Amino acid sequence: AEVTRDPVGLGKALYSEAAFHVGVGAWDPARTAASRGLEIATELRNPQEAEVAHTILGHVEFATGAYEASRKSAVVLYESAHARDNLQHRTWGVYTQARAALYLGDLDAAIRDFDAGMHMLEGQSDHASHILCGGMLASALARAGSTGRARTAADATTERIGSKRTPVFTIAEGFIGAADAYLELWRRGDASVAPAARTALANLARLAKLFPIASPAAATLTGVYHLRAGSRRRAVRHLRRGLAIAERLHMPYDQAVAHAALAEAGLDDHAAAARAL
């Protein structure tokens, strides 16, 4: 595209490059490629491509723990898509704002926006967004204590995951959300979710083979599963592996989850680290 002086083609190539780097957790190259693509789209006054760039940059910010920056990228995405009435990108903007709220602990805002996103997705054939939004909604509902709705959302997401091949790297939080929802329901006393949790974790493990950024959660949540099942030794082994991967990939939220679970397993030195992250 550079040789043929095709700026649109170059922008698309940069987004593809950025997406690859995100999938393997190479954050700096991903940010560089997406930022360059955004510059090209802005110069060309091409909002469609600029919104794609904001989506990728928002994911980089989210994965590296810059949740407020991720939320701001989602707002820019939403406002741009709203101005030109692009429903798909507007939906992305809504549920990626909810994603930031979820990881910041603002469950009311997260549930409100995930619900709005699911409503907007009705009639859309955006398989990835259905999984992403539905899984994270399940996680938010479980953490908020809405156990019935959480189970319904997690089951629907798990069924959808099993129906088609995984299309894109950004889908990871949907897989993680479904697994997290089941484990949170189990923590709250509903051991009947154990088989569903195993299925969700198997789905997540398969995803992690394709996209390394899912690997920390796959290992850590497997550790949490064993912790719930009473297998402390197995739990600690998986949790330590998840922590090591999260540290290598510079993913602070996954580090915090692993530290918190290791503290729950009785390793006291991890409690302070979880709070610090």
Image (cartoon, rainbow, N blue to C red):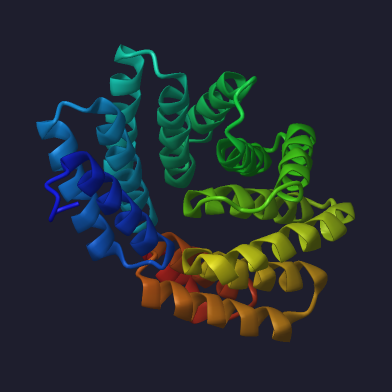
Question: In which image quadrant can residue 219 be found?
Answer: bottom right
Q: Is residue 183 visible?
A: yes
Quick check: 274 above or below 168? below
Q: Is residue 65 visible?
A: no
Question: In which image quadrant can residue 234 be found?
Answer: bottom right
Quick check: 221 above or below 43? below
Q: Residue 275's spot in the image, x, y percent? A: 42, 62
Quick check: 195 above or below 7? below
Which residue shows up at 53% across the image and 64% down it? 214
Q: Residue 81's spot in the image, x, y percent? A: 34, 21
Q: Residue 65's spot in the image, x, y percent? A: 34, 55
Which residue shows up at 39% across the image and 65% down it? 251
125 relative position to 257: left or right: right
Q: Nearer the viewer, residue 16 or 111?
A: 16
Which residue shows up at 62% across the image and 41% down it? 131
Q: Nearer the viewer, residue 78 or 236?
A: 78
Q: In the displayed orientation, state which residue is furthest to the front.
A: 4
